[in-house]
């Protein structure tokens, strides 16, 4: 997301981020609360790589089914994903290594390998493969991660 950074606000919020407190951003509509949350998420990604972050835009109708805390917990639990990133996968040995890391994880969550390769196979033993360009240009990260959730039954 492109936005104008607000370091003064972000520095104020940053002081409280490590505290075990509930933080609330309040304000009128359309003044930048969502943009500020995006900036906070970007900061967390830089400072704590691998953090599990979820951004749900309630103005996006694809999230309309989330109406209470139980729906939110179910949504997050149902849509966890494991991601492995590789520069390229030039040969079978690298393919086995990159996909194998995810195959070793014994859960039922979606598994995804992201690389710069032209996609010759869309999956390998159930692990999906996607080009970095497609991963980064999705209108929402959820467009990729939640395909099963958003598709009709």
Image (cartoon, rainbow, N blue to C red):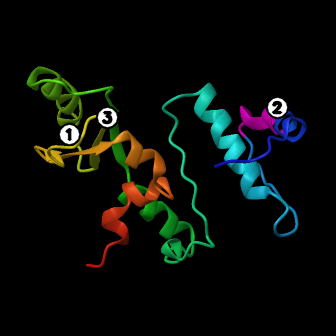
Q: Which of marks 2 and 3 is nearer the N terminus?
A: 2
**Which residue is at a point 54% across and 51% down the rendered structure image?**
54
Q: What secondary structure is marked by label 2? A: helix
Say above or below: 150 vs 105. below
Residue matched to label 1: 106
What is the crowding at mark 2: few (fewer than 14 residues within 10 Å), some, or many (at least 20)? few
The magenta span reads 13-20
**Which residue is at a point 49% across and 77% down the rendered structure image?**
65
Say above or below: 149 vs 65. above
Extreme residue toward the front, this view: 118
CA gap, disc 1 and disc 3: 23 Å
CA gap, disc 2 and disc 3: 36 Å
Between 92 and 15, the residue placed more toward the observer is 92
Query: Where residue 121 is drawn, which disc sits there?
Result: none
Q: Where is residue 82 in the image (x, y as percent from the top left)?
A: 33, 41
Is residue 16 within the magenta segment? Answer: yes
What is the crowding at mark 3: few (fewer than 14 residues within 10 Å), some, or many (at least 20)? many
Is residue 110 within the magenta segment? Answer: no
Q: Where is residue 1 in the image (x, y as percent from the top left)?
A: 64, 49
Residue matched to label 3: 115
């Amino acid at each position: 997301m492109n936005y104008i950074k607000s370091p003064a606000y972000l520095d104020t919020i940053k002081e409280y981020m490590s505290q075990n407190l509930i933080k609330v951003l309040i304000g009128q509509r359309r003044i930048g609360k969502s943009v500020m949350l995006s900036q906070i998420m970007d900061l967390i990604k830089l400072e704590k790589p691998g953090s599990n972050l979820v951004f749900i835009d309630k103005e996006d109708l694809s999230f309309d089914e989330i109406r209470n805390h139980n729906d939110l917990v179910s949504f997050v639990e149902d849509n966890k994903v494991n991601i492995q990133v590789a520069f390229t996968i030039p040969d079978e040995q690298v393919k086995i290594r990159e996909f194998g890391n995810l195959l070793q994880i014994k859960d039922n969550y979606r598994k995804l390998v992201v690389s710069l390769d032209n996609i010759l196979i869309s999956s390998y033993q159930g692990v999906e493969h996607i080009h970095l360009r497609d991963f980064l240009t999705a209108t929402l990260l959820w467009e990729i991660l939640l395909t099963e959730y958003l598709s009709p039954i």
